Image (spheres, grey):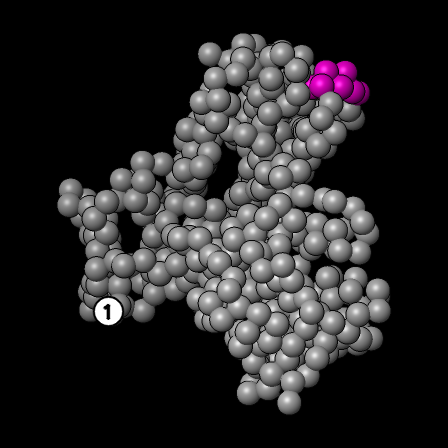
Amino acid sequence: MTDRFDAIIVGAGQAGPPLAGRLTAAGHTVAVVERKHIGGTCVNNGCIPTKTLIASAHAAHLARRGPEYGVDTGVVTVEMARVKARKDGIMLRDRADVESWLEGMDGCTVIRGHARFEDPSTLRVNGQSISAERIFLNVGGRAVVPDIPGLGTVDYLTNVSILELDTIPDHLVIVGGGYIALEFAQMYRRFGADVTVVERGPRLASREDPDVSAAIKDILEGEGVAVVLNADDIRVSRDGERIAVSPRADVAKIVASHLLIAVGRRPNTDDLDLARAGVTTDGRGYITVDDQLRTNIEHIWAMGDCNGRGAFTHTSYNDFEIVAANLLDNDPRRVSDRITTYALFIDPPLGRAGQTVEQVRQSGRKALIGYRPMTRVGRAVEKGETQGFMKVVVDAETHQILGAAILGVGGDEVVHSILDVMSAKASYDTLARTMHIHPTVSELVPTMLQEMTPLN
């Protein structure tokens, strides 16, 4: 016997629960299938727990800097068990809130288990078949475990398992130089661990402009994080009770207590039996979708990390908004209408929107660029946080903003004023002539835009 619903949502991450809310409010019966924890990556092992840990690390860092501000803090110690307990409490409350919302939602049935397709309209969960006229896949992603010689001989951590540590590593080696790796690197250095980052490529945060990557490296090294680049022959082995990591032939092996592998993520699409539904994926396993997130099968959609159209909580939630707008509101919203934007939550943070300067250069278009170091931002000086800079690039002919990078105190918030102007397709002059509040970091954005020069 098959249980029938108007819609099935597979995965209870950022896009799934709000879509269930909209569909049930419109009178549809909905089944939400979740094989592990409701809330997905963000709530359980992504944004919520990691930013909670970052907040504790920032508190420790600021306490150590107390004498710079005329505040005597004495010896600063970090009790990792209490740090973890705080993180767990916040995360579990968040998860419980989403669970209670879904389980109390009229018209919604929560099914715990692993869903696999039987045919394009039918899924099997816990031996029971369920079917629907519409199916939405929101299955997320997981950490990539690379083929590193010797990795299978040691105990290593991923972005999930490292969250369970209740002691501070003596020495943490992190393989990877992307956003997850860098956030954990600074965090654990501030907790008191020795930290070494080992990156295969020539620079950290490789999707950013070279000057941004260099500044990030300076920030981390300034706090005592060791960085090894061009690690093109990484090998791992046991060294007694410890772990030895050899980055490349001309660099001595690094012996550490803990190893974190943070080299990227992959979609959770390999165990859904997508072939039985006829749903196509690309070479990396991401589900192929159109501009409104519909797969090649008309009644199946894919949202969030599994569709390759964004790997952030905000892109996942925006996927929900796009799907709901098209299905329920007669509002033809599209993925291609949104502007790429994200942040790197080291301290100070990086806020990004649109294209990098290098991408603009490669396009061949005439452009203008504005730049301002944080040493020339009064608020940053007053707070004693002058690392980084802000820059923006605009089209020289249309005056539309093409991209921005704000690396500095408040950069993850300041970038939104630029993003909003980009979304409105307004001239950068609109922002340049807007009066901002003093003393803030945002007040220097108009000043920067008034000092544009041609991009070479």
In magenta, the rendered stretch is 427-435
Locate residue 264, reporting x and y percent: 42, 53
Locate residue 317, reporting x and y percent: 67, 53
The residue drawn where x is 73% and y is 62% is 19
Q: Residue furthest left?
A: 249
Q: Residue furthest bottom?
A: 1
Q: How many marks?
A: 1
Please name whichever residue, 330 or 401, is drawn nearer the observer in this view of the structure. 330
The crowding category of the residue bearing disc 1, from other C-alpha atoms within 10 Å (few below 14, some 14 to 19, many at least 20), is few
The residue drawn where x is 47% and y is 51% is 180
Locate residue 251, reporting x and y percent: 19, 44
Up the image or down, 333 lies above or below 85; here it is above
Locate residue 436, reporting x and y percent: 77, 24
The residue drawn where x is 62% and y is 39% is 336
The residue drawn where x is 78% and y is 65% is 23
| Residue topped by disc 1 | 153
Local SS, label 1: helix
Please name whichever residue, 328 or 345, is drawn nearer the observer in this view of the structure. 328
* Occupied quadrant, residue 38: bottom right
Up the image or down, 151 lies above or below 232; here it is below
Q: Is residue 344 left or right of residue 442?
A: left
Q: Quadrant of the N terminus?
A: bottom right
Look at the image and tell me whether residue 292 can be seen.
Answer: yes
Look at the image and tell me whether residue 102 can be seen.
Answer: no
Kind of residue at badge 1: Thr
